[in-house]
């Protein structure tokens, strides 16, 4: 293998890693927005998912490590992943209650969750670790699967498998049809006996579970601890990718791969002395804006998106 | 709100706290350890070294409280006039008894403190040690009653008697007393309904503040749970809690003292008050920005980015603009607004032209702005030569493009087919960038030195020139803050201030009562009035009135914030543009039908919204709130997000925004005190409260619709008065 191919394979791997959290969050957003609820809380939910995963994994392995510092607690990160899904689903449920049951402006409700993701993790971390920005390090990370030099966390595989799964669920099952119908025309759906609010609850909670998984990938898939603000705008980029991908799973896949490539290339550029790193971090955001301004005009969102259903 | 249920429920809770919760606390030591007094007369000591003092009058207070709570509770079930009269009387009596109870408690401990200090001094005199200055001690005891205890303590140090701290110091009311005052106040408020006017005023007030008040209460209640979980009752060494009642009193004391710490620092002292105003100033700006956007139907989450760019512009203006202070300073303030406006106008333009969602774009631009700020202030960034050439040419081409857009012919040509021209421009830019960026021989890394960067590794700018610095508040009174230690005597130009005030008031009043006059006639008349006032007062010698100025770090940015709030009110409520913006916000379709240009309005609204947020640089950069009048990376742009909470709590109107910004200023100031006072609590609790306020305001749907929706409120009130006219009495509030 030549040096160039190695760089190329390395770049490809880092593109896939950068894509994973974006893809998970974008798929989550897909379920929520298809049911008619805007979810800019993806960012906050990812933070909470990351926190849930890291704290749970750390608390589970702690007693074992106290006995034997080299103990292998293989199940700790997996329970962490489960916790991230539960926490994500719970935060999604809060967004659902506020915006569906109490008919709040969906963007304000989600903004509240994003604000909470700044203050509450700090409070929890202070209570657990006397440190308001990072958790303790986790010794047992998720395993890496794959061939030599090209290994990924199981969550990476899961994210890409979830694309066809989401497509099948949304476009080939009665559940998906109902979910989309309450997002397009809730009154019509209601008149044929679909429980609009319940379907929207499903959509938003599923989006929370998926975004929570994305958060878990950040804290125990890619790294081995929780760091404050670790979502770093990925939730918003995922949302932009969802719009760019015209609210379809395959479109979301394409868009997140593109944004993932921006991020990976940006990191690569920052490594050499090409651009100062502070400017490199801005690159994915600038490109996202250009893409949104240039192409979104033609994308058609679900018709009833952003509107509370008033029976 | 159902007032009978509210008073009854509150009374029961207050009666319970009167029995279980501390009445007052005293002898508060480091790490928030203290001792508390419970009604009727019981002391629990958490420090392990406090001697209790007997306060027999508290038994009377306990009986009074029990009787008054019973009155209030029974009255809640009585018919209308009796109920209100009983509430009014009972509430007043409750408040009076509470203050009496707090008074006797404080008096007893004051007396005990005096006795103890005197006895220590007398003991030292009876058995003098080698260091004691006996003659000095005798004279100190002679003047003991004429000076404060703190002064005596310091004097005692001089004569060789060491008293580390005053005994029984730092007393504060407890939860039981607080609940009594709250219950009494509410009973009085609802009791005022016995008067016809009072009924209307109380109802209007209750309707208006129900939503924000409920949101704040719920957020504080959630914070209470967090405080109870995080912070164990602070105990001294070897102190054991005897039973569950002591443990409960400890928990309630911890909780109440935490809130006491949050609020008392800002509301209890002048220094704390100005400190809270200092925290509030940037929140007013960002709150106005977000609120302005909401009024126009736009959600501007980009205040953090607009703050950063406003600060950048203000810094550049403040460092480089030549000229005298009276010219540079207003221009620097304008630059701050311009920076924010540019950053806000971009997503506005993208929405108007391409339909791109402003929520996502403003968020993305926050990240871009923070990168830009870091890049501009970080020390000596290194580029590859070709990358630098690409960036330079990109910047030049964009400037040329913007210049070209000002030529009408070019503009019509480009806007005729926006997508095609966008693609064309992109293509040309790509070609330019490729040509510029093509590697050349001898390319190496280039280090860029920006001239305004301060030397050293810390990411900050050089300080602003003197002419671009906003005065601190004491400076407005003619005091140099650098030389100011403690309170300072200064002269105050009362005549000038009163003249300005008179002129402003006259302008407003003339507008109200003499509508026919042209505005310039009103202006002339009010200026003349102001000049006359100045003349008279100047003759009386009030141009240099001596005053004592307390120390304060508050800068003139606060006054600009108030002015901005007034400006927003006038702009939205009194001008054609403001009317169009509000119309477009509430009902875009109708507004467009009425001839409002929605696209232009979107750009204008986003630009002004960003301008308000950008003005926060007057506080942080021109006002020197980030130390030594320079721009630093530590610029707290999270104030931009807090502005969302401020705007929502203030219902997007300028007065509400100023008030809620002040509340958050108090909380933020209190948060820093919380950090210091308690071992396990941090200021993050305050950030959590802010977020929860937004959540609960968003979820206000659980309240009755007449509280959350002004239109439904009007309908409800009409129905109510109609039914009352028909059936006479007894249509309950």
Image (spheres, rainbow, N blue to C red):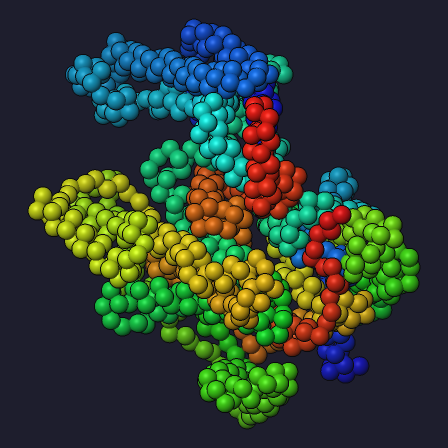
| Percent of width and height locating residue A255 | 73, 71
Q: Quick one: B574 or B146, which is closer to the camera?
A: B574
Q: Is B539 placed above or below A27 here? A: above
Q: Quadrant of residue A278?
A: bottom right
The residue positioned 35% from the left and 35% from the top of the image is: B269
Q: Quadrant of residue B665?
A: top left
Q: Is residue B1 left or right of residue A297?
A: left
| Percent of width and height locating residue B211 | 56, 40
Quarter in which the N terminus of chain A is drawn: bottom right
The residue positioned 23% from the left and 42% from the top of the image is: B549
Q: Residue furthest front?
A: B726
Note whether residue A225 is visible.
no
Q: Is residue A150 left or right of residue B244?
A: right
Q: Quadrant of residue B319?
A: bottom left
| Percent of width and height locating residue A288 | 64, 71
The residue positioned 38% from the left and 53% from the top of the image is: B566
Q: Quick one: A243 or B480, which is closer to the camera?
A: A243
Note whether residue B543 is visible.
yes
């Amino acid at each position: 293998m030549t040096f160039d191919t190695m760089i190329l394979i390395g770049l490809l791997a880092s593109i896939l890693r950068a894509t994973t959290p974006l893809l998970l969050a974008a798929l989550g957003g897909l379920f929520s927005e298809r049911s008619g609820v805007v979810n800019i809380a993806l960012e906050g939910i990812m933070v909470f998912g990351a926190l849930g995963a890291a704290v749970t994994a750390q608390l589970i392995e702690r007693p074992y490590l106290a006995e034997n510092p080299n103990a292998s607690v293989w199940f700790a990160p997996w329970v962490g992943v489960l916790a991230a899904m539960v926490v994500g689903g719970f935060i999604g449920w809060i967004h659902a209650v506020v915006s569906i049951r109490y008919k709040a402006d969906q963007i304000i409700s989600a903004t509240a969750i994003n604000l909470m993701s700044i203050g509450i993790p700090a409070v929890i971390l202070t209570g657990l670790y006397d440190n308001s920005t990072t958790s303790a390090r986790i010794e047992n990370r998720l395993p890496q699967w794959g061939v030599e030099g090209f290994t990924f966390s199981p969550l990476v595989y899961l994210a890409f498998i979830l694309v066809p799964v989401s497509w099948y669920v949304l476009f080939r099952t009665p559940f998906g049809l109902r979910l989309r119908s309450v997002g397009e025309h809730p009154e019509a759906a209601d008149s044929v006996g679909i429980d609009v609010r319940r379907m929207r609850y499903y959509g938003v909670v599923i989006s929370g579970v998926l975004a929570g998984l994305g958060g878990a990938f950040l804290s125990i898939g890619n790294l081995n601890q929780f760091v404050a603000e670790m979502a770093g705008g990925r939730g918003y980029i995922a949302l932009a990718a969802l719009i760019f991908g015209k609210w379809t799973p395959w479109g979301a896949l394409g868009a997140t791969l593109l944004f993932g490539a921006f991020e990976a290339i940006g990191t690569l550029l920052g490594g050499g002395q090409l651009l100062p790193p502070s400017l490199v971090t801005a690159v994915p955001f600038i490109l996202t804006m250009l893409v949104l301004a240039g192409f979104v005009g033609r994308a058609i969102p679900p018709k009833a998106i952003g509107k509370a259903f008033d029976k | 709100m159902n007032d009978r249920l509210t008073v009854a429920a509150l009374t029961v809770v207050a009666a319970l706290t009167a029995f279980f919760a501390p009445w007052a606390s005293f002898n508060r030591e480091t790490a928030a350890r203290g001792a508390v007094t419970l009604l009727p007369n019981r002391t629990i000591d958490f420090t392990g070294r406090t001697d209790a003092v007997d306060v027999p009058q508290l038994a009377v207070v306990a009986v009074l409280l029990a009787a008054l709570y019973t009155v209030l509770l029974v009255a809640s079930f009585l018919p209308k006039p009796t109920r209100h009269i009983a509430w009014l009387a009972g509430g007043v009596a409750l408040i009076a008894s509470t203050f009496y109870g707090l008074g006797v408690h404080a008096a007893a401990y004051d007396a005990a403190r005096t006795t103890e200090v005197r006895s220590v001094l007398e003991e030292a005199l009876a058995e003098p040690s080698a260091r004691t200055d006996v003659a000095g001690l005798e004279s100190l005891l002679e003047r003991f009653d004429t000076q404060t205890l703190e002064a005596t303590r310091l004097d005692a140090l001089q004569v060789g008697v060491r008293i580390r701290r005053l005994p029984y110091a730092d007393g504060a009311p407890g939860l039981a007393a607080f609940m009594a005052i709250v219950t009494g106040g509410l009973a009085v408020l609802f009791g005022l309904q016995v008067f016809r006017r009072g009924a209307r005023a109380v109802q209007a007030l209750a309707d208006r503040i129900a939503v924000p008040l409920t949101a704040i209460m719920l957020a504080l209640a959630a914070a209470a749970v967090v405080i109870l979980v995080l912070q164990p009752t602070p105990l001294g060494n070897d102190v054991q809690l005897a039973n569950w009642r002591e443990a409960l009193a400890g928990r309630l004391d911890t909780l109440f003292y935490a809130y006491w710490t949050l609020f008392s620092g800002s509301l209890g002292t002048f220094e704390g008050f100005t400190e809270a105003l200092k925290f509030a100033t940037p929140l007013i700006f960002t709150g106005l920005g977000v609120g302005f956007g909401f009024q126009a139907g736009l959600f501007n989450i980009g205040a953090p980015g607009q703050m950063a760019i406003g600060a950048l512009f203000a810094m550049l203006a403040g460092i480089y603009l030549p000229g005298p202070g009276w010219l540079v300073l207003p221009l620097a303030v304008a630059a701050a607004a311009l920076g924010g406006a540019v950053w806000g106008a971009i997503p506005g333009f993208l929405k108007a032209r391409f339909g791109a969602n402003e929520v996502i774009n403003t968020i993305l631009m926050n990240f871009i702005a923070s990168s830009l700020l870091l890049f501009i202030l970080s020390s000596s960034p290194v580029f590859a030569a070709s990358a630098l050439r690409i960036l330079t040419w990109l910047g030049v081409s964009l400037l040329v493009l913007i210049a070209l857009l000002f030529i009408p012919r070019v503009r019509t040509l480009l806007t005729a087919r926006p997508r095609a021209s966008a693609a064309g421009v992109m293509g040309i830019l790509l070609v330019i960038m490729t040509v510029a960026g093509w590697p050349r021989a001898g390319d190496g890394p280039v280090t860029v030195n920006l001239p305004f960067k301060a030397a050293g590794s810390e990411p900050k700018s050089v300080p602003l020139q003197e002419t671009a610095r906003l005065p601190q508040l004491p400076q407005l009174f003619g005091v140099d803050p650098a030389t100011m230690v403690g309170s300072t005597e200064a002269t105050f130009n009362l005549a000038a201030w009163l003249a300005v005030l008179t002129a402003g008031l006259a302008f407003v009043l003339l507008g109200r009562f003499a509508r026919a006059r042209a505005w310039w006639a009103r202006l002339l008349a009010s200026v003349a009035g102001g000049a006359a006032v100045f003349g008279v007062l100047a003759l009386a010698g009030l141009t240099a009135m001596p005053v004592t100025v307390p120390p304060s770090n508050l800068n003139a940015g606060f006054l600009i914030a108030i002015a901005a709030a007034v400006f927003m009110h006038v702009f939205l409520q009194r001008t054609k543009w403001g009317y169009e913006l509000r119309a477009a916000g509430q009902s875009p379709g109708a507004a467009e039908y009425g001839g409002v240009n929605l696209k232009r309005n979107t750009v204008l609204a986003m630009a002004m919204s960003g301008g308000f947020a950008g003005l926060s640089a007057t506080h942080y950069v021109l006002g020197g709130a980030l130390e030594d009048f320079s721009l630093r990376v530590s610029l707290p742009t999270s104030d931009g997000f807090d502005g969302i909470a401020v705007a929502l709590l203030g219902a997007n109107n300028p007065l509400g925004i100023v008030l809620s910004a002040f509340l958050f200023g108090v909380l933020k100031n209190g948060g820093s005190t919380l950090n210091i006072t308690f071992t396990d609590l941090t200021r993050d609790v305050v950030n959590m409260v802010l977020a929860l306020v937004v959540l609960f305001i968003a979820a206000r749907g659980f309240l009755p619709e007449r509280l959350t929706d002004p239109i439904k409120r009007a309908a409800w009130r009409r129905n109510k008065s109609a039914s009352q006219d028909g059936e006479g009495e007894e249509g309950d509030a």
